[in-house]
Amino acid sequence: MSSLSSRWGALAVLCTVIFLDALDVSMVGVALPAIQHDLGLSTSSLQWVVSGYVLGYGGLLLLGGRTADLLGRRRVFLAALGVFAVASLLGGVVDDGGLLIAARFVKGVAAAFTAPAALSIITTTFPEGPERNRALSIFTACGASGYSLGLVLSGLLTEIGWRWTLLMPVPVAVIALFAALKVLPRVREERAEGGHDLVGAALITASMLLLVFTVVQAPEAGWASLQTIGSLVVVAVLLILFVLAEQRMRHPLVRLGILRSGSIVRANLGLLILMGSYVAFQFVAMQYFQNLLGWSAFGTAMAFLPTGLLVAITSTKMGDFADRFGTGKLIVVGAAALAGGYAIFLGIDRTPSLGGMVIPGMVLLGIAFALSFPSLNIQATNGVHDDEQGLASGLLNTSGQVGGAIVLAVVTAVLTSGGGETLSIGSMRAAIVVSLVLALVGLVISATGLRARRAVPVEQKGSATVYETV
């Protein structure tokens, strides 16, 4: 992939797949009320249609990134894309809620291998600097656009039938698979040494699954109950064991030294907050627009159109903006816009104003995504050696997806804390407060990076150098 045309041809295929990965996180959003009605799911169970995919995605991203570094990015990308297509088909034809959640989980696992492989192919193909920043801005724009426009597309397809929201990715994934076989040529890749850290993968995945399950069940079991407290203790033990295992492993799933970089840590926390708060907000908004206000699926999708359009139109320019202003400033402005968007939606009532609340709020959220998402991806991978690009990519994507699952679980608990399945304006407003508080925390964290000026190496481990921005 040395020629310019082959590099950009490969980028087109990779962008298509990341668009699908992101699309699948959000596209079931508008369809959730219809799925709930047809399959008889409770509100607590319904969130697992989203969380099942997100947890499969986030729980195994680190293993996916490491596998791409070890076995070859092209090979891992192609195999996972094939599984993604099959799981998409199965999810669209099942008639049981449990089977649907299982299919969504397998689909998320497949995405956990395609996403870091795709990102690391880009970061090892395009040289660091303006060319890579441009490629990453296009790549992340496709991811952000897929996530934002997935809501709009879901609204259109749900009017026909909710199953189409699950089946639509199948032909696109198959076409992308055959295109990838042609445009991702077999080349000799620089691969990382060592083997798989299956112990680390099992510990981190089990801890994330148990954490989300505990938070979802806490309102019913009681936050002070033995079940809830015991489960949280087990989660803490699993995380401690994960850290200890990574310190002892010769070839760990996560080389903890990479987290000595403040810029990488800020990028991961930033994406965790961005995705976590927005996935949760989207879930609340779907319930608000459709179940409380009685809007159609198409009408709900149109409410999210400003966000999707802003992301699609402006995100490709973020590479140029990052070169000119630096990622730190863009992330801070994006965090402020995110908080502003959530703050506007605190005014929800039974007669919402399109011009006073819905459109301005969605525009601010679109600005937030357009500025933050590409900038966080650029910041998280700059200064990382090629043989750890899969690790850096996996860390970043894990932060976003696990953040989405955990915050969604918290918000679901807030929504259902009053008991029963009837949702109120008060419970929805309280749920939006969770997203707003997180956005404000993200603003504070991102502001600490404004003093960053230059990158210097802080650690050398073999051929892998980690840089700190100071």
Image (cartoon, rainbow, N blue to C red):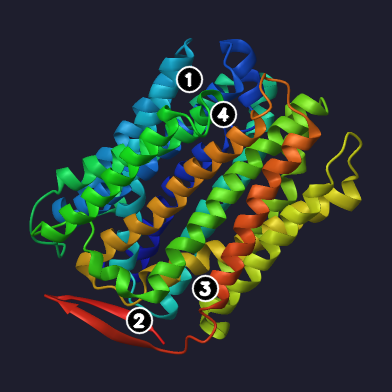
Per the rendering, the mark at residue 65 is: none
The foreground one among 183 and 105 is 105
Q: CA distance from mark 4 to mark 2?
A: 42 Å
Element type at mark 1: helix
Residue indicated by mark 3:
319
How would you rate the neighbour count of disc 4 (Cα within 10 Å): few for under 14, some for 14-19, many for 20 or more?
Answer: many
How would you rate the neighbour count of disc 2 (Cα within 10 Å): few for under 14, some for 14-19, many for 20 or more?
Answer: many
- Identify the residue shown where x is 45% and y is 69%: 266
Question: Residues at badges 2 and 3 in contact (C-beta under 8 Å)?
Answer: no
Give the mark toward the camera: 2 or 3: 2
Give the mark toward the camera: 4 or 2: 4
- Identify the residue shown where x is 38% and y is 41%: 57
- Identify the residue shown where x is 58% and y is 44%: 279
Residue indicated by mark 2:
468
The foreground one among 31 and 329 is 329
Q: Amino acid at mark 4?
A: Pro
Residue indicated by mark 4:
219
How would you rate the neighbour count of disc 1 (Cα within 10 Å): few for under 14, some for 14-19, many for 20 or more?
Answer: some
Above or below, comparing residue 127 to residue 218 in the picture: below
The foreground one among 251 and 140 is 251
Residue 128: percent from left, percent from top = 35, 77
Q: CA distance from mark 2 to mark 3?
A: 21 Å
Question: Residues at badges 4 and 3 in contact (C-beta under 8 Å)?
Answer: no
Q: CA distance from mark 1 to mark 3?
A: 37 Å
Residue indicated by mark 1:
92
361 relative position to 209: left or right: right
38 relative position to 19: left or right: right
Quadrant position of the C terminus in the picture: bottom left
Marks 1 and 4, the one that precedes in the sequence? 1
Residue 105: percent from left, percent from top = 38, 30
Quadrant position of the N terminus in the picture: bottom left
